[in-house]
Structure formats: C-alpha cells, structure tokens
Image (cartoon, helix red, strand yellow):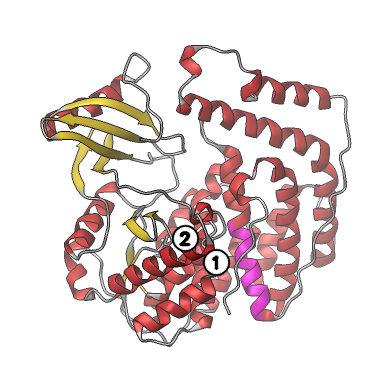
Amino acid sequence: MRGEMSQGSAVSESWQRAFAWIEAELGGKVVHAERQPRWRPAWFIDLERDTGRLPLYFRGDRGEAEAGVYSLERELRVLKFLEAHEIPVPHVYGFCPSPRGIVMERCPGRADLATAESDAVREAVLDDYVAILARMHRIDAAALAPLGFAPPADARELALSDFPVWERTYRKRKLRPEPVLEFLVQWVRRNVPENRRRASLICSDSGQFLYEGERVTAVIDLELATLGDPLADLAGMVSRDLSEPLGDLSRAFRRYEELSGEPLDRDAIDFHTVRFCAITPLAVAHLVAAPPPGLDLAQYLGWYSVWLRAPLEVIAKRLGVALDPVENPGPSLTRHSTAHDALRELLTPSASPSDPERADSYSSYERDVAARVAEYLRRAERFGPALEARDLDEAAALLGSRPPTWGDADAALEQAVLASGPERDAEWVRLFHRRLQRLEILLAPVMRELEGAAIQHID
C-alpha cells in the first residue's frame, strides 16, 4: 500500500458506510484505508478475508460540480468488457451505491514512466502498452453494442467522436467569454479528416497504465472510453505526455504502425491531438471561472492553460507559424504585497502547527491546495497588472481599439474569432499563445508536473 491510514474517528460517516458495504458484499474486514491525495474521491483499501488480504481500490464519483460527462456505471461496463476480451484492466468486484464508487482490484505496479529505471525499461513498457492498444483496437466494433456505443454514421461523426458531447456541456455551463476555446472549437469543426472509416473502442484519455518491470500490469482510468478512430488513442498519448512524460512517442507510434498493419496518418493524429486537448478546457472552463468550494484551483488553472496552449502549438506547426516567447516583466510591489507573503507563509506545510489530525496524506493535500492558491495570488498581485496591460495592447492591435478591461477584451476577441475564417488562424494562434504564456508566468511556481510542458511533435 502507498502508506496507510487506519480507519477511525477521522473517517466520515459516509466513508464508514462505504467500508461497511465492502465488508458485507465481499466478506471480510477492512483493516486499512488511505484516501488518495487527489482532486477526486478515491481510496486504497485492504480487506482481510479468510483467504488472505485483498488489496482494493475505490474509485469514487466526481460529483455534479465536477468536469465529467460520463457516469461511473459506464466505466464499470467498459472495464468488464475489456477484461472479458483479455485486455489487462483491474477486476471489478462491485459498485457501491452510497457513496457511489467502483470497487476494483488494486493492481501491482506504478504509474509514471518518467520514473522508469532506464530508457530501455521505458521503451519496453511503452512498446507493451501500444501492443495492448493495437489488440484493443482490433476488437470487433459490433461487440460494443451492449455498452450502448452507437456506430458513427459517417467519417465526420467518426472523427469528432464525443467532441459534440463536451461542447454541448461546455455551452450549458459557460460563464464568461472564452476566445481561445472558441477558436479551438471552430478549428476542430473546420478541419475534420474525411478519409478515416474504421471505428473501434478507444481509451480517449490514453497513456494511463500501471507497470512493473518491463510490462504493463493494468490499463487504468477508462472513464472517457468510447467509440472512435483508433488514431485518437495515439493523440491521447500526445496529450498525456504533457503531464506524464511517456518517452519517444514517434518511435512508439512506428511500433504501433507495425502491429496494426496500417500506415499512420500524421494529419489525422494532429487533428485528434487538437480535438482531444480542447476537451480539457471545455470540461473545466466553468470551474476556473467560478471555483466551487474545495476546488484545487491552481491545478485546474494549470490544466486549463496548458491544454489550451498545447493545441495551438500543433496548429502553428501545421501552418508553419513561428511562435514567440514572452518576457516576464518582473515584479511590481504594492502596499499589499507583504500581506500576500504572510498568507503564503501561513499556508505552507512547514508553517502549519503540528498535530496528529493533520498527519495523514489527504489533510496534507488540502493544505497544499490552499498554499498553491496563495502563491498564485501573490504572483498575480506582483506581476498581473503588467502582464494584463500587454494582453490589452496586443488585443488592440487586432481589434482596432484598446479594450478597457480584460473582460471587455475577452468578449471582443470572442466575437472577432466567431466572425473570422481560416485566413486569420495564424493571427489568432500567435496572439493566444502569448496570452497563455503570460498566464503560466503567474502559475509558474505552482505548475508542478506541468512546469515546462510542451507538445511532443510526431515525426
């Protein structure tokens, strides 16, 4: 287990109810439980039974305010389907009704290929993963009918896959102008490849797996699995590589090409990279616009910015557009700067008072969430005004007049984007890429795994 926390008074009544359900359904006694320190509710659990200790993973529901559009029950059906077709996924033991969650096998191994012992191990694991993808993509699409996945009507529907679902959800939740996101949506709808025909079950959010030695032990996080173009899973790996470096994807994709027996369509992979990257900001735009209580805001802002910027880099390469780095203007202190410093110090873990209740990893995670927001606000106070002024100056060059505020600028830019055609794509890519670089200057100390993230262009 990744560290342990004994059940006790610190565990809420709802989670005690979940543990009792597991004991009743699977037979045995929950002897240890550790809440995974992340944004979605999940637990590592040990169940003691007559036959020995059973390691479990409880994958909880995101909740209504979160960024998902698919149900846990859907993911459960996908897991069972793939296990029946001999794809290595965690075995499902059951579905807890309250609190809602999939109770599944906790498989051996670890995630994150960046921690592999050597380049040789990394390449071997990645080769094993693309071989699993190739096997999964060969499953007869007709067998997916019990999952409720309808076959696409034509090449356009195949290429877009579930993009319309995410776009509809985004528009329903939209709270403010989103000029960069509207540009990406418009680009996706204008650049659909019309030459693709074969549909298969795809992970969508691919590149997520556990490994041990040189082999994949389990494909995980299949929440977004759907019916689509197999090449979309290669694009999903390009997206995943931004936060969890996977190694040389060009080499891995050539291996996939050998195993699948089909030549790779680089333009289609680029399209799917832009399409899939855009799904993240489509899902979280309303959350960063109006963060609900408890949201890991710095993490979500990082996702929002990186997965808006990265597809712009793909489009820029296709257009032959050079992207310019932006300058950090340096800090400008105000009379309030010391208050921001004090808040950050109060919230950093080293400054927190020591008591046993704060010793578990999830409490540390909650404190870290607050500390990251405090650091972001500290930088926004020092650097924000100068960066925003440069955004407004650049917007003026394209709009013809300088908007008085960032909100006015976003509204005017969104209207200009919606009224424009492909002839202005290069202008928008350059402008929006610079704006997002400036946002990441503010986020720099709290970007964590996204620090320096850049799209891996496929040869």
Q: Quadrant of residue 289?
A: top right
Q: Is residue 80 above or below residue 423?
A: above
Q: Is 276 located above or below residue 152 in the figure?
A: above
Query: In what quadrant of the picture does the C terminus appear?
Result: bottom right
Q: Which residue is mark 1?
A: 185
Residue 167 is marked as 2
- Residue 257 to residue 209: above or below: below
**Residue 347 in the image, given as x and y percentages of width and height:** 64, 23
Q: Quadrant of residue 40?
A: top left
Residue 181 is inside the magenta segment? no
- Where is residue 281 drawn, in percent x and y? 54, 54
Horizontal relation, residue 41 to residue 336: left or right: left
Dot 1 crowding, Cα within 10 Å, few <14, some 14–19, many 20+: some
Q: Which residues are magenta?
A: 307-318
- The one of 128 and 371 positioned closer to us in this rendering: 128
Q: Residue at x 43, y 61 (%)?
A: 207
What amino acid type should be assigned to the residue bearing mark 1?
Val
- Name the chief secondary structure element in magenta: helix
Query: In which quadrant is the N terminus drawn?
Result: top left
- Residue 195 position (above or below residue 79): below
Sequence-wise first label, 1 or 2: 2
Q: Quadrant of residue 378?
A: top right
Q: Are marks 1 and 2 in contact (CB under 8 Å)?
A: yes
